[in-house]
Image (spheres, helix red, strand yellow):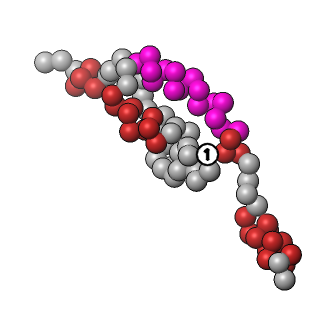
Amino acid sequence: MSDDNELWNRDEVQSPCVRICVIHPAERLCTGCLRTIDEITQWSKMDPDERRRVMADLPARAPRLAKRRGGRKARLARDQSQT
């Protein structure tokens, strides 16, 4: 009988999913893995070359989500300026 671990070893590009599945409203990217909704839904149907292209593009997307919108401090300042 063969080793059970061999059964699950596949030569494929693994998903970049980190189980933080929140789509950024403006950028339309998952804040966890940086993929688009289309890339996420099509991942299982993509061939290895398509997956590699997506994976290669992900680091360039990170700065698009790095900009903070201000949080509580910005909200308080905005509220004070409106009064």
Instruction: Report if residue 31 is visible in the image.
Output: no
Q: Is residue 10 magenta?
A: no
Q: Quadrant of residue 79?
A: bottom right
Q: Quadrant of the N terminus?
A: top left
> Which residue occupies the extreme bottom position in the image?
83
Would residue 8 appear left or right of 60 to someone viewing this image?
left
Would residue 77 appear left or right of 31 to someone viewing this image?
right
- Magenta span: 48-63
Q: Quadrant of the C terminus?
A: bottom right
Instruction: Report if residue 50 is visible in the image.
Output: yes
> Which residue occupies the extreme left position in the image?
1
Q: Quadrant of residue 5?
A: top left
SS state under label 1: loop
Q: Foreground residue, 33 or 75? A: 75
Q: Amino acid at mark 1?
A: Glu
**Residue identified by numbered label 1:** 27
User: Which residue is located at x 28 percent, y 26 percent?
Assistant: 8
Would residue 8 appear left or right of 56 to someone viewing this image?
left
On screen, residue 37 above or below 22: above
Q: Position of residue 23 (x, y in %)?
A: 53, 50
Q: Position of residue 19 (x, y in %)?
A: 46, 47
Q: Position of residue 15 (x, y in %)?
A: 43, 32
Q: Position of residue 26 (x, y in %)?
A: 62, 50
